[in-house]
Image: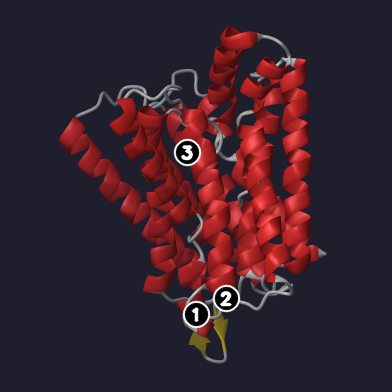
Amino acid sequence: AMAFGLAALSAVFNGTFGIFGKMCRTAPDPVIFNTYLTYGALISSLAVLALSPLWEDGHFLLGFSWWGALCGVLFVFATLFTFIAIPLAGLALSAATWCCSAVLVAFLWGAVGPVSPPRQPMRSAVMSTGGVAVMIAGVLVINFSSQLGRRLGGAGEKGAAEGAQKQAEATDVDEDGSASEADGEGGAGGRAVGLLSAATVGLFGGSVLVPAAFVPKDLQGLKMLPSFGIGAAFTGSLVAAAYIALWQPSLSSAMRPQAVSYGVLSGITWNLGNICQIIAQGPYGLSYGIAYPILQSAVLFGGLWGIYWFKEETHGPSIAIFWLGALVLVAGVIALASFGPGS
């Protein structure tokens, strides 16, 4: 029960960390804000050392693992591709794509991955696959609840268009916490590239902790976090440096103390979810193929923030459909937990 509680808590944190970008008075540059996020991940990773003994049996327990750093690199690239996907394919469609992709990728690592762990035997391959399919159906209903609610509520095409705009605003709490455009602008070819980029977000996002299986045993668990934080912050800094050099963006809003502090807080919040995942999969033995798909249920909690805190959706039928999607998502989680890898 504790393992599933930690996995669910990780989804809460993963669905919450993106709200801090919305709290900035002026929307910060998303790439720079994402760099601050990686610094928050580094700070919180180093802070965890205070909770662990650093000396045992005459030697230091602190060390660096390139595999742990690779986890941090995957995290940065998961957010980086959102900046390509959203302008080309639109936020709602992109978010639906990368959520579904992340659920599927995480499950496949746990079910048929080339190494064990993360691969674990399944109690029932059919029921596991069905659970993942139900989870994906729930994610899709949640992501498109505004459009569906307005269409089914008789609002017609105009209402559905308004719903798409609402959904774009409400969904913008899932990966990077930045304000982004709602509609794709690249035509058919551009949209295809955008959707491919969104699927890539899920590929990286569903694989973040896979390299942790190769970390030396004396550095596994929470001891891996410094390596993770260093990898994330270093990669984030390189991405920001290349972005500034190539695109020369205006940094006036991005350098404001509010943007810096909220970016760091966003990274700390995300890493709390990461820590929950590490503990759930480590001491409590929850398999990757169950724990990490549950993490991707963050879209539910991001939607709750959007509806009940930011008031981005007030249309009754749309909210009802959101909750319908939530029930479907939870049903899929229960099926996966009951029959999935390592169950």
Q: Mark 2 points at which residue?
A: 119
Crowding near pointer 3: few (<14 within 10 Å), some, many (20+)?
A: many
**Colour option used:** secondary structure
Q: Mark 3 points at which residue?
A: 176
Side of 187 relative to 43 (left or right): left
Label placed on residue 59:
none
Q: Mark 1 points at which residue?
A: 115
Is 300 drawn above or below residue 294 in the view shown?
above
Q: Tell me what residue is drawn at x 59 percent, y 25 percent.
A: 170
Q: Nearer the viewer, mark 3 or mark 1?
A: 1
Q: Quadrant of the C terminus?
A: bottom right
Judge whether residue 51 can be spotted in this image.
Answer: no
The residues tagged by marks 3 and 1 sit, at their Cα atoms, a distance apart of 30 Å
Amino acid at circle 3: Asp
SS category of the residue bearing label 2: loop
Amino acid at circle 1: Val
Q: Position of residue 222 (x, y in %)?
A: 57, 69
SS category of the residue bearing label 3: loop
Q: Tell me what residue is drawn at x 57 percent, y 11 percent.
A: 157
As rendered, which of 232 and 115 lies closer to the eye? 115
Q: Tell me what residue is drawn at x 58 percent, y 53 percent.
A: 103
Q: Position of residue 114 (x, y in %)?
A: 47, 77
As rendered, which of 198 and 276 lies closer to the eye? 198
The residues tagged by marks 2 and 3 sit, at their Cα atoms, a distance apart of 29 Å
* Labels 1 and 2 touching (C-beta < 8 A): yes
